[in-house]
Image (tube, rainbow, N blue to C red):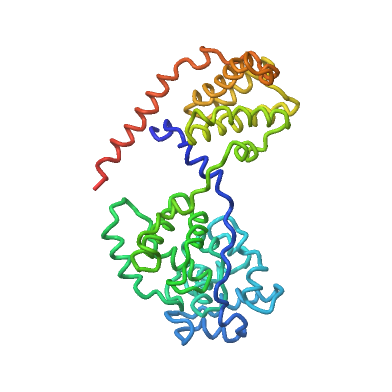
Amino acid sequence: MVKDLVDVDLDDVLDAEETSPPARVPIFRQPSNAAIPREDLLALAGGPNRLAQNIDRDYRPQMALFLDRLLQEPGRTWQQRWEASGAERATKIGGWADTFPGLHAASVAHSRSGPGRMITILLRADVFRPSLEFLALNSRIDLSGLPWSTRGLDEALERFEQRSHLIDTPAPRRGLLAIQAATGKHLDEIVVEELVVLGRSLTKYRRAQAANAWEVLKLMGIAPTDAPSLRQLTRAPRRDATSMVDFYQVEPPAIREMFLRYLRGREATVDYSTLRNLAYELLKNFWSKIREHNPAQENLHLSPELAHWWKVENARDRVDVHRTLFMVRGLYNDIAAWATQDAYWAGWAAPSFLTKNDTAGHMKNKRRIQAAMHQRIRHFIDRVP
């Protein structure tokens, strides 16, 4: 496959590594019916009513099963019982229903619907708040009919679609509704931090949904029209050399100090992107693997067996292996040159285990990667409007 010939964008890898896990979005407005009795909830599931509109079938059998399982958990409110149930800890789509034995079968048998209908009914009745991460994962749960204001959303979505020229742009509607369901907010109360958590919770294919939602809020006048894009607002701050070394937890302390001095020495002669790539290749793809294979290694003098193992490991399942080879070879050559002027580097100088033969063919490999990228462009060019 042509796609398999194209290496992963290193900047995307580094951006992902420098992104900290998102914190749970706090509930902004507590559910108004958090302690509603079980019998009243069963009545809500029986058909159209004041609290839960658009309930067109009798969902009481599966709702009884759902509520009885929650009643086994500690808590005075349905929110507390839901959080204690562990349903949100499921990592696969729809896996939460396994916490409620028999719910899926009962849903199909009684109403020919999925178990997510129970979540929809309780959301419309403002009974509890699932987390934003849960709603992002389980994208089939219907979030229509929520009791919070969406005034102006349809018009803004229409304007957004007219302005958007992207192919298969993820629709931002559900992302905004998910934030409302998780926080109890009206549209004009949503803030950028919640969109950041949404974006980090979505799959890579649907991640643009959060950025599109931010643009829709701009069109609605909720967010400043001149505000930067969501990507610009959430970009991690630049790391200095010390932060880069600490991020990869380089050991032992002496080798950490050596890499830190090396990066600081290169920092004045390269741009930030190059410095970050250099740290990634040397600290993660080179030294971290060396230490993982041989925890006793404390210097750059690699045995022939260890050097051969690393060359094989570096080439495993990678396309652009030469990038790492050149940077590691440059490390050895730089230290050898600096050692003639600085006694500190004389103690770290070591013969390079990489030769010109190891980096031979890099231009051929580069042209092969470029040819694969050009083929992808030719393949998709007809789909561009």
Residue lying at 51% horizontally and 64% vertically, measured from the top left: 135
Residue 98 image offset from top left, x and y in percent: 61, 63
Say above or below: 165 vs 125. Answer: above
Residue 17: image quadrant is top right
Lateral position of residue 247 relative to residue 358, left or right: right
Say above or below: 378 vs 306. Answer: below
Direction right: furthest residue? 296
Work out whether residue 56 or residue 315 is closer to the camera in this orientation and state it. 315
Work out whether residue 305 or residue 19 is closer to the camera in this orientation and state it. 19
Say above or below: 311 vs 122. Answer: above
Residue lying at 53% horizontally and 69% vertically, measured from the top left: 182
Residue 376 image offset from top left, x and y in percent: 33, 36
Residue lying at 53% horizontally and 43% vertically, measured from the top left: 238
Work out whether residue 12 or residue 119 is closer to the camera in this orientation and state it. 12
Residue 342 image offset from top left, x and y in percent: 65, 18
Residue 380 image offset from top left, x and y in percent: 30, 40
How many marks are shown on the rendered structure? 0
Direction front: furthest residue? 341
Lateral position of residue 88 relative to residue 177, left or right: right
Residue lying at 56% horizontally and 55% vertically, measured from the top left: 92
Work out whether residue 106 or residue 365 is closer to the camera in this orientation and state it. 365
Q: Quadrant of the N terminus?
A: top left
